[in-house]
Structures are given as C-alpha cells and as structure tokens.
Amino acid sequence: MQNEPTCQYGMHRYNHPASMPGEFDFISWIRAQSPNHPRVLLPQGDDLAVLKWDTSDLLIIGVDQVLDTVHFDSSIHPPREIGRKVMNRNLSDCAAMACLPAGAVTTAALPKGTPFDYAKEVYLGMKDAGEKFDCPIVGGDTATWEGKLVLTLTILGRSAGVEPVTRRGAKVGDSIFVTGPLGGSLLGRHMNFVPRVHEARAIAAAGVSAMIDISDGLSRDLRHICEQSGVGAIVDATSIPIHEDAVTMSRRDGRSPLEHALHDGEDHELLFTSSVGHPSYVRIGRIVSDPGIFIEAGDKREPLEPRGWQHTF
Amino acid sequence: MQNEPTCQYGMHRYNHPASMPGEFDFISWIRAQSPNHPRVLLPQGDDLAVLKWDTSDLLIIGVDQVLDTVHFDSSIHPPREIGRKVMNRNLSDCAAMACLPAGAVTTAALPKGTPFDYAKEVYLGMKDAGEKFDCPIVGGDTATWEGKLVLTLTILGRSAGVEPVTRRGAKVGDSIFVTGPLGGSLLGRHMNFVPRVHEARAIAAAGVSAMIDISDGLSRDLRHICEQSGVGAIVDATSIPIHEDAVTMSRRDGRSPLEHALHDGEDHELLFTSSVGHPSYVRIGRIVSDPGIFIEAGDKREPLEPRGWQHTF
C-alpha cells in the first residue's frame, strides 16, 4: 500500500450530520438501494430474504471477510474500494469454481461514530461490484462497536449448466496455467482487481481439471490443488508471468520479482490445470505423479516452498 | 450479564501450545469436524461449498454477527456459548420465517494470540447448536487481527412445504401472540436461548399471518410487523408474560418488570399474528386498522414507544 496517498480518503473526510442517524435509518436507506431482481422473491427487510432457485442449479456458497489493518487500511483506502474488495474477493471465489454469482448477504461492524455517508459508500462499493456480475445484495446485518471496521460477505453461486470446478481434479500430465501476471498486488491491485468470472466460464467450456484463485500466493495455492488432487507439480521459473508491480516492489525490498510473483497473495488471477491447451493464458508448468512441488530454471530444480500469506494465531 | 462469574471463562484459561498453529491448521481441524450430510456435495475446503438443493424448496438466506463487548463479553462468556449464540441467532431468524435450517457458513476474526483450543471451542459451539436443527456448517473464513473477536454466520433455510412467513401479513382483527415470557434476557438467557424452529413450523401449520423473533424488544419488533403490514396494534399490558429475569432486573434498576418485558431485546421468543387461536401461546393484543401501537391497562391507553436496542452511529 506504500504508494497510495495517506489519509486522503480517511474517515475524517466525511462530515457527521448534526443528528446521527441510527442503525434503522441506515437499513432503510439500504432497502431503498435494493433493486428488483427476478431471483429475489422477498428482499432484505424481513428476518431473512427469500430467493427463487432454478431447479437445475447446484447451490454454491462461501464467505470472506475483510478487516481494517489486515485486508485494507481505512486511513488510506476509500470506503468504496473497501466495499468493492469484499465483494470482489467473493466473486473471485465464484470464478474459481466456474459458477455464476447469484446473490450475496453482508455484515458490517462499523466503528462508533462512523459517518452515515461513509457507511453508504462502503455499501455502494459492494453493490456496484456485485451488479457488474448480476449479484444483488439481498440481506445483511449492521452494528456499531468500539472496534475497527469489519466487513463480511457471503456469496451464493449457481452452476448454470457448468459442473463446479474444484481443486481436486488435477491429473498427471495436465498443464498448469495462470490467467495473468503475478506479484506486487500490495501496491494497489489487491483493492482493484477484476474477478475472473467470465474467463472462468470460458476456461471451463474449453476444458479444465482443477482451478483456484490466487489469494494466498501461487506457491501456496498450487499446493492446495496438488494436495487435494493427490499429485505433484513442476513449475518452469522462466515462464511465470511477472507483473510490473513485482518489479517495483523488488526495487524497494530487494526480493526478486520472481519471488514476489511466486509468493505474494491477493493477485486473484486464476490458477488452473487442464489436459487441453489454453492459448489465451500462460502455461507455467505441469502436473506430475511424484508428490511435492518443484521449480525448474534451466538445469536446476528445487522445492517450491509455500511462503504466501498465512494468518497466525 | 451482571450475575455471571467474571473472568472464569476468559481467554487466559486456554493454554497456548509451545508452537502456535496457523490458520491452515485450524482449517484442517475444521474440515475434520465436517460431517457427511446428504445436502452437501462438496464440503468446505475448496473455494466454495456445493450443496444440492431440492427442486421444490425456496431458498431463504440471512446473516447475523456477534461482536465482543456488544453481543457478548469474552471476559465473561465461555467460547462455546459465544459460538452457540451466533448460530442460535440465525436459527431464530429461520424460526421467524417458519423455514427449516439447511446449512451455514461462518467467519471468525480472532484476536492475535487466540489459543487454538479457544478457537475450537467457539467452532464447536456453533457446530453443536447447528446440529440440533440439522444445520451443518459448510464453509467459512478465519483470520487473526489486533481487534476483538468477531463472529458472523450466514444461514440458509428451505421452505420445505411451508410458505415463508413474513412481517407483512398481519390483518385487522388478528390476535397477537408471543411464545414465552419476556424481559431481562441480559441476565444470561441472551446467550442460552433455544431457537423456536419447531414451534414456528407448528404455528405456521395452525395458521399465522405475520411473524418475527423478538431480538430488538417487543415494542420495536411489533412495530416492524405493523409498519410492514400497514396496520396498527393494541397491546393488553396485563397479558404480557413477564419473565422472572425481568423481575430480578427490576429490583436492581428500578425499571418495572413490564418495562423490561416490553423493551428488552434478545428474548428470541416468536411474536406472531393470527386469525385463529393458539392455545399453547399467550395472546397479548390485537391488530387494528388505525396506525400506531398502543398499550392498554384497564381504562388507560397510551402509545407504546419503541425503546428496544438500536445501534447508533
């Protein structure tokens, strides 16, 4: 986050109205934002929302949270970006399964004294990001507390004619692909990535055996695929697409651009395996039967240890 | 929370192991807890979980969060109770719609240094409470941070042959009922209530026009029904069932037991309207056409103002 302007977008920019509205005013405002949607029979505003579910669809569900100082910094990032990030992280999970987003519910734990307009901006960030992929927000829960901002978003996906793509299906001999250049997302892309929802559907149509979105870092996410598929992998160091942000970060911290591309998290590109070619994407390696993940460069082969992000207790 | 032992169950009781496990160890442990369930085609451990959805079921969804110092106090309440509370709040929302729980996803933002065993206890509290109502946890997201404990839980409900009961259907002439005595839940019941899932199904089978669970307080939750139904209500003060906890709290704070029963939140009894009799439950008033909510005692009638819990910005 180093090259972003500090404090320009912090909470102090939002004026407190003379009379603070409460939770129910915010909820009323949110309800007015809810568009009519053919899947939504009863929108937020009751105890729960009611959706119509197409009889042929599998139901896909997951949840992601973003925490101030961990996944974003409220003193740096504008509230609309923060809201967008939590929606996009979940949309990216839908992409990883090659399903279509169907709807979302969300929670906000707002610091006491959060201006109404700030809360609205967070919500609009989520809403706008969702609408780009036909994903209405259908319910939520808001509270205020003495702590920092916490947002969570639960996403529903629908299979819509495509079998969900898991992490379990990688086969010996498959190629490994990524959908875009990696590394250095902390310079800003982690707040502004585009979830690969449409790309995933095309990948699944062409042929895919396993898929994940790169959130913990290539080295760690490839391990998830290999462990769950019971296979190993050999990655070609020279083929890894390196983002220019990785080069920029390398200049600052002395770690090589490749290191950043291999281990940085929150790229949210898709990492997938396939027995067929995918000319639009970069082939970075192959699936092998021997367990373990190795990286090759010329004659050298060494274990690729996961060094991506892991929360520690 | 006044009469509960302080600090007996706080985080310090849990020993830190010599080597702190990280997020992935906790996730591995969680996966091992996930039971096989006929609705779950792919359990947590992939990007998202995949559920089979019965073709005749409407999909009902909502989310609730609990925040340390707002909805519970980690220095007082044991972690298993905290986990149970977030599940039970959501199960109570299912009850309010008369749907059957179908599954849940959850997030935990854990304070850095949270012992592994403490995190497990929180999870087991959610899991055990869910299993009582056939509600498996199918996915989740865990992170650690410098803040206090935040749990969220998103619940899926299925209509299972019963039209979801909303807040919108109250009709002039309907009676108003509650399923149990009210007030003083802060003495401990707010952590230990039983969600009225089964009662709700029986109520719906007998005949119900609108329903809500009492989370914000009777005065406020009855208002939700009246506003959304476009009706008014007259409550009979002498018929309100008063919990003995309301009497205990009255002795401490000088507010009358009736005040506690009318305005305290987190009772999680059901408040419903019906044109038919419900001999198992207490009739507390009637729906009228004139807007506004009034409380009668003998010859006296006065407006019943909402004084329940509202988070303020």
Image (cartoon, coloured by chain):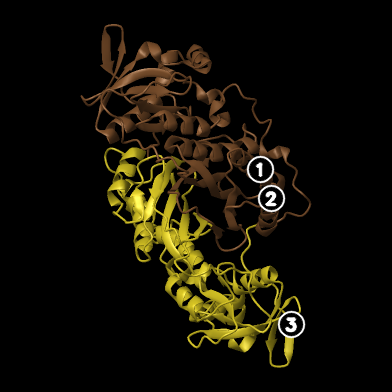
Chain colours: A brown, B yellow
Is tag 1's residue or tag 2's residue first in the polypeptide sequence?
Answer: 2
Identified at 30% across, 6% down, the residue is A298
Image mark count = 3
Which residue bears the numbered disc 1? A124
The chain containing the residue under callout 3 comes to: B
The chain containing the residue under callout 1 comes to: A
- Quarter of the image with the N terminus of chain A in it: top right
| Amino acid marked by disc 2 | Gln
Residue nearest the viewer, comparing B10 with A273: A273
- Quarter of the image with the C terminus of chain A in it: top left
* Alpha carbons under labels 2 and 3: distance apart: 35 Å
Which residue bears the numbered disc 3? B302
Which residue bears the numbered disc 2? A33
Asked if marks 1 and 2 touch (Cβ < 8 Å), the reply is yes
The chain containing the residue under callout 2 comes to: A
Q: Residue furthest top?
A: A298
- Residue A274 vertical placement versus A297 (above, below): below
| Amino acid marked by disc 1 | Leu
* Alpha carbons under labels 1 and 2: distance apart: 9 Å
Identified at 47% across, 30% down, the residue is A202
Q: Is residue B46 left or right of residue A253?
A: left
Q: Which label lies toward us, 1 or 3?
A: 1
- Residue B243 vertical placement versus B238 (above, below): above
| Amino acid marked by disc 3 | Glu
Identified at 71% across, 77% down, the residue is B232
Q: Is residue A54 visible?
A: yes
